[in-house]
Amino acid sequence: MNLMPVTTDHRKISIAPMMDWTDRHCRYFMRSLSPGCMLYTEMITAAAIVRGDAVKLLRYDESEHPIALQLGGNDPAMMTRAARRAEEFAYDEININIGCPSDRVISGQFGACLMRTPAIVAACFRSMRDAVDVPVTIKNRIGIDDHDSYEFLENFVETLSAAGCSKFVVHARIAILGGMSPKDNRSVPPLDYERVFRLKREHPELEIVLNGGVQDIEQIDELLQQLDGVMIGRQAYQHPYFLVEIEHYLRPEWQMPDRHAIVAQMIPYIEEQLAQGERLHRITRHMLGLFAGQPGARAWRRYLSENDHQDGAGVEVVLAALEAMPVAVQAAIARTAR
Ligand SMILES: Cc1cc2nc3c(=O)[nH]c(=O)nc-3n(C[C@H](O)[C@H](O)[C@H](O)COP(=O)(O)O)c2cc1C
């Protein structure tokens, strides 16, 4: 993949950690859309890395830099061992998940419920920071349950800041623990950007990245006037071409690749992965939204999703999905490819 040098501006934009979504194939695809934004892995528990197949969990393609590993856990010793492994794999950042509200995570006493016990998070942070050179950061909510105030958020952040943490990615809504699904927890509690702005205003020395509900370039532009960065989740996954538009916003001189060129860039990667035994669907499932909002999007999506999981499916399925798009769209693709 041809990559451009990453600028400081690039790191202002990051793609959120998303379980089952931002795996290594998804990140490779996203990198083909945006040469510079910061990519986050799905949350991986520290215990899985320490006790499980760390190589399988942590491997990634060189092109994915800058890349952050997101860790889940609450035990300083375990988190530190996982952080050391992450450092061996040359991750650019290690991020601690203090935002996940799932039942599995609550029963393990990590994720969002740790906002209630900042001292435990600080103990993990300190131990990790002392053990590795790679920056350790936090991703948290603005509150949980009835702890829904600026003071609660500030107390959490100040405790971590006193432990040495200088970067916080703040999902600008509270988490409701117990009784609300993770999906609803990403849309039902209202967004409160003002609370995040105030955090930055009152703690200008901290790097504050806002996450939650970011949909378009105008919004990114406005948010960057007040904050250090913006993290984008669902909009980037469901409308991946948005990443190309963001890159273009950061570097207006950049020649935007069209969607067809993005597919073409993915073909050698797909072939290489299939040769290693990967299944086509594991990669193309992340590409379904590439034509979202464009004529032919439905045909692309339908053809791929109906054919990419069959035994032996190869790149011919991807090419056929392009051909399944209406003739008018193919003509437009051919014109831009010329
Ligand atoms: C499918 C899915 C999985 C997610 N998994 C994680 C995760 O592993 N770690 C995490 O911190 N947040 C996770 N999130 C939350 C996102 O990182 C982000 O905070 C949330 O989607 C709000 O941002 P958005 O409105 O831009 O999507 C997940 C979100 C989605 C949609």
Image (cartoon, grey):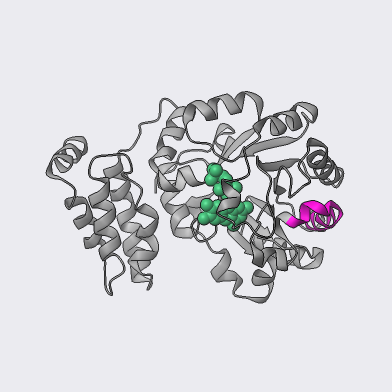
Q: Position of residue 230 (x, y in %)?
A: 59, 36
111 shown above or below 240 = below
Q: Nearer the viewer, residue 205 or 324?
A: 324
Residue 66 seen in render: no
> Does residue 37 belong to the magenta stretch?
no
Identity of the residue furthest to the front in this view: 179
Q: Nearer the viewer, residue 319 or 305?
A: 305
Residue 115 seen in render: yes
The segment highlighted magenta reads 113-128
Q: Position of residue 323 (x, y in %)?
A: 17, 52
> Does residue 127 belong to the magenta stretch?
yes
246 shown above or below 60 = above
208 shown above or below 317 = above
Q: Quadrant of residue 259?
A: top left
Q: Position of residue 239 (x, y in %)?
A: 40, 43
- At a point 68% along the width and 29% down the height, the residue shown is 194
Quadrant the C terminus occupies: top left
Left or right: 115, with 215 as reference point:
right
- At a point 79% along the width and 54% down the height, the residue shown is 125
- At a point 30% along the width and 49% down the height, the residue shown is 263
Number of numbered discs visible in the structure rendering: 0
Q: Position of residue 190 (x, y in %)?
A: 62, 39
